[in-house]
Amino acid sequence: QVQLVESGGGEVQAGGSLRLSCTASGRIYSSYVMGWFRQSPGKEREFVAAIRWIRGATYYADSVKGRFTISRDRAENTVDLQMNNLKPEDTAIYYCNWGINIGEASGSWGQGTQVTVSS
């Protein structure tokens, strides 16, 4: 079973940038899709971005397209999320997870990392 630990959150002003990192322990299978999700207070957890582990194809929610970039390092077993031009509505706890399909979260949720964007 893959275990995931998120890091890199913090507080920034609107327009700023942050880079989140997800470190995986355990085997990531070639069929896996690694994804980032977020949850704001009072809202459901939502899909943010995903990347196919082997092919590297990427997918984004419309709300972050053009601002966020997901990448992975297969040698280091990490999945990063570069977030630029952050907006107050990006404030949330960010989580990574794995699945077989885009937007799917099949693993256990970790503690996540808090991102706070002030206006």
Image: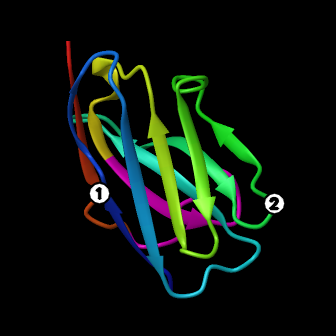
Q: Could you say which quadrant of the image residue 42 lies in?
A: top left
Q: Magenta span has 97? A: yes
Question: What amino acid is labelled 1 in the image?
Answer: Gly
Q: What's the CA distance linking mark 1 and mark 2?
A: 26 Å
Asked if residue 9 lies left or right of residue 76, the reply is: left
Depicted 24 relative to depicted 64: above or below: below
> Measuring 28% from the left and 37% from the top, which residue is drawn there?
92
Ranked by sequence position, the earlier of labels 1 and 2 is: 2
> Measuring 32% from the left and 23% from the top, which residue is drawn there?
16
In the rendering, at what x and y percent does residue 118 appear?
Answer: 18, 19
In the rendering, at what x and y percent does residue 59 appear?
Answer: 68, 41
Depicted 1 relative to depicted 85: above or below: below
- Res 12 seen here: yes
Question: What amino acid is labelled 2 in the image?
Answer: Arg
Q: Closer to the camera, 62 or 8?
A: 8
- Disc 1: CA contacts within 10 A as few (<14), some (14-19) or many (>=20): many
Q: Closer to the camera, 76 or 106?
A: 76
Q: Give the foreground label among 1 and 2.
A: 2
Spot the residue most to the right.
55
Depicted 34 relative to depicted 106: above or below: above
Circle number at residue 112: 1
**Predominant secondary structure, magenta span:** loop
Q: Which residues are magenta?
A: 94-108
Q: What residue is shown with label 2?
A: 55
In the rendering, at what x and y percent does residue 14 appear?
Answer: 28, 16
Asked if residue 109 lies left or right of residue 13, the reply is: right
The secondary structure type at the circle numbered 1 is: loop
The secondary structure type at the circle numbered 2 is: loop
Quadrant into which the C terminus falls: top left
Asked if residue 63 lies left or right of residue 56, the reply is: left
Asked if residue 94 lies left or right of residue 72, the reply is: left
